[in-house]
Amino acid sequence: MTERTVTTRRVPPTQLAQHLRDALTRLNRRVRQARPVGDLTVTQLSALTSLRLAGALTPRELADVERVQPPTMTKIVAKLEDRGLVRRTPHPTDGRQVILTVTDGGQAVLDQFERARDGWLATRLADLTEEDLDVLDRAAEILQRIARG
């Protein structure tokens, strides 16, 4: 039986932050590029995803979540609504407002995008060793904890 020596390497937090940010940015860019053929923009897809996660939002709330100006969100929502991906319903307490929700068609589009992205990533992960997969599983848990914190 061979004994394994573990070397502890201390990377300064600022250097690790830069390394992680760069890796996550590049991975996110590649995952976003792995999408089914379609004419939805990244911005439209992001707004649709935010609506699904929230359940329902006013256009102003969606603009705030997406960090865009309300006139920009109005254009995004109009395009999503034209495609039948988003539904407007009257606000229950404020007649001047509407509530936006994802339609079944919008949900189907999001599911299709997720399958394409997950498929791309799963194919890349399949080439890794069990040890690498274990490390990534642990790293994913830690990154989730950081994101929630």
Image: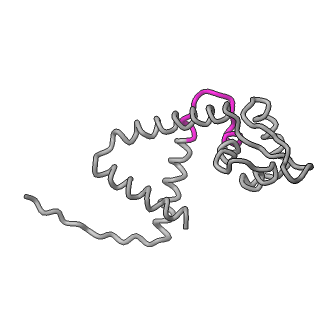
- Looking at the picture, does residue 18 appear above or below residue 49? below
In percent of width and height, residue 123 lies at: 40, 36
Screen quadrant of the C terminus = bottom right
Question: Which quarter of the rendering shows the N terminus?
Answer: bottom left
The residue lying furthest to the left in this view is 1
- Residue at position x 54%, y 38% in the image: 114
Q: Position of residue 39 (x, y in %)?
A: 68, 29
Q: Front-most of 88 and 129?
A: 88
Left or right for 125, reference 93: left
Residue 61 rendering spot, x and y as whole percentages: 78, 54
| Residue furthest front in the image | 92
Residue appearing at x 65%, y 28% in the figure: 38
Please give the name of the residue rendered at 67% of the width and 30% of the height, measured from the top-left corner: 105
| Residue 43 painted magenta | yes
Range drawn in magenta: 32-45
Residue 137 among magenta residues: no
Which is nearer the eye, 118 or 55? 55
Q: Which quadrant would residue 103 be assigned to in this image?
A: top right
Could you tell me residue 9's position as x and y percent? 33, 69
